[in-house]
Image (cartoon, rainbow, N blue to C red):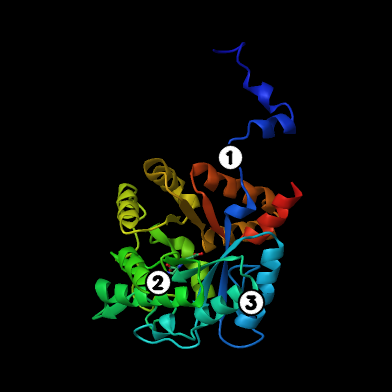
């Protein structure tokens, strides 16, 4: 029925009415907060390109986690920044690696907090690529083996979720069966399924010290021009046993999030990446945008597109703002 019988403004008259008919809800329990952990003691190093984000050693990270938990956040994802790197990423799966140590201590102190770990090699290799390099090329199957070993070591340390972000073919299946063989049937896999070769990762590479030393990541991460291919990536990862599939970045790829949720109806995560964070921070610092309003609108948009879970550096701020609403 058209105007004048239908007047959509009737349901916009008051905050109470608007809330009554609201379609999308943003809740703190949807958010995962990324943290960076490095070797040493008493370390807190600000990441210049990401105001408000720091690298912590395990001891100072525990203090940070306490704040995160107090804010009501129920999940974190851990990125390791090891002291030493080599060609085969030995630090990625070391029993006393920086992520493994952090996970053990966090789960020890905060048993109820969901701890996810980023499973990748780029922070641990001297060449900065996400896989094994031979003659300047990134070798798929050898990389998958190391990734599976890394995922199992994270599970052994107590991770609830392992999140492979390398984009090698077949890694989800290899990780799932390695976890199962080792007795970690209940550790979930959150696959970075549709991860694009994006310029929005720039600030993160300072945080994680994971910049490729030659070339770029376009031979493994997805071409930003493609969307149908993302559905194939997701479909394969689900077949291989992914519990949660991720689209990354989030804001420039809302169409992909939408299609993945529509097509598969499975739990979808979206990574609101470093570049998306830093752009807002820079504009807000100049007084050009209202940070709180812009951030809550962005996060809501990611949820509206179809994401169930959002990984975001804004999680702490958003948790505070949401609790005031
Ligand atoms: C590791 C990894 C990256 C990000 C998450 N895991 C960087 C990359 O692929 O170069 C980016 C996260 C961000 O930008 O916030 N492979």
Q: Is 126 or 148 nearer to us in this picture?
A: 148
Q: Earlier in the sequence, mark 2 or mark 1?
A: 1
Residue plotted at (73% across, 32% down): 16
The image shows residue 127, relative to residue 280, as above or below, that is below
Give the percent coordinates (x, y) of residue 212: 39, 75
The image shows residue 70, relative to residue 136, as above or below, that is above
Residue plotted at (65% across, 82% down): 59
Q: Is 218 or 167 nearer to us in this picture?
A: 167
Image check: 8 left or right of 151? right
Question: How many residues crowd mark 1 within 10 Å: few (<14), some (14–19), many (20+)?
Answer: some
One can see residue 105 in this view: yes
Image check: 226 left or right of 13? left
Image check: 77 left or right of 179? right
Residue plotted at (55% across, 78% down): 104
Nearer the viewer's eye, disc 3 or disc 2? Answer: 2
Q: Which mark is residue 213?
A: none
Give the farthest residue toward the front: 183
Q: Which mark is residue 61?
A: 3
Gap between marks 2 and 1, in whole Å?
A: 38 Å
Q: Is 283 or 176 nearer to us in this picture?
A: 176
Question: How many residues crowd mark 3 within 10 Å: few (<14), some (14–19), many (20+)?
Answer: many
Give the percent coordinates (x, y) of residue 171: 32, 67
Give the farthest residue toward the left: 135
Gap between marks 1 and 3, in whole Å?
A: 33 Å
Q: Which residue is mark 1?
A: 24
Give the percent coordinates (x, y) of residue 84: 46, 88
Q: Earlier in the sequence, mark 1 or mark 3?
A: 1
Q: Where is residue 218, by image quadrant? A: bottom left
């Amino acid at each position: 029925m058209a105007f004048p019988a239908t007047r959509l403004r009737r349901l916009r008259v008051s905050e109470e009415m608007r809330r009554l008919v609201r379609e999308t809800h943003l809740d703190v329990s949807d958010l995962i907060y990324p943290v960076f952990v490095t070797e040493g003691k008493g370390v807190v190093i600000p990441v210049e390109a990401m105001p408000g984000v720091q690298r912590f050693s395990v001891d100072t990270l525990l203090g940070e986690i306490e704040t995160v938990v107090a804010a009501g956040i129920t999940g974190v994802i851990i990125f390791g920044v090891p002291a030493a790197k080599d060609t085969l990423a030995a630090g990625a799966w070391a029993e006393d690696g920086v992520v493994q140590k952090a996970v053990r201590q966090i789960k020890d102190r905060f048993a109820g907090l969901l701890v996810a770990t980023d499973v990748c090699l780029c922070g641990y290799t001297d060449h900065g690529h996400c896989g094994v390099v031979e003659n300047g090329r990134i070798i798929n199957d050898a990389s998958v083996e190391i990734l599976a070993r890394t995922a199992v070591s994270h599970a052994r340390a107590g991770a609830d979720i392992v999140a492979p972000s390398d984009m090698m073919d077949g890694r989800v299946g290899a990780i799932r069966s390695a976890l199962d063989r080792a007795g970690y049937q209940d550790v979930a896999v959150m696959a970075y399924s549709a991860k694009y070769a994006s310029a929005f990762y720039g600030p993160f590479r300072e945080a994680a010290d994971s910049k490729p030393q030659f070339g770029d990541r376009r031979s493994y991460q997805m071409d930003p021009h493609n969307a149908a291919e993302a559905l194939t990536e997701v479909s394969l990862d689900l077949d291989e046993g992914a519990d949660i599939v991720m689209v990354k970045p989030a804001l420039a790829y809302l169409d992909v999030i939408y299609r993945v949720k529509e097509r598969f109806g499975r739990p979808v995560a979206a990574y609101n990446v470093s570049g998306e964070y830093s752009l807002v921070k820079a504009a807000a610092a100049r007084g050009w945008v209202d940070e709180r309003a812009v951030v809550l609108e962005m996060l809501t948009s990611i949820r509206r597109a179809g994401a169930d879970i959002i990984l975001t550096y804004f999680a702490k701020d958003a948790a505070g703002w949401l609790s005031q609403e």
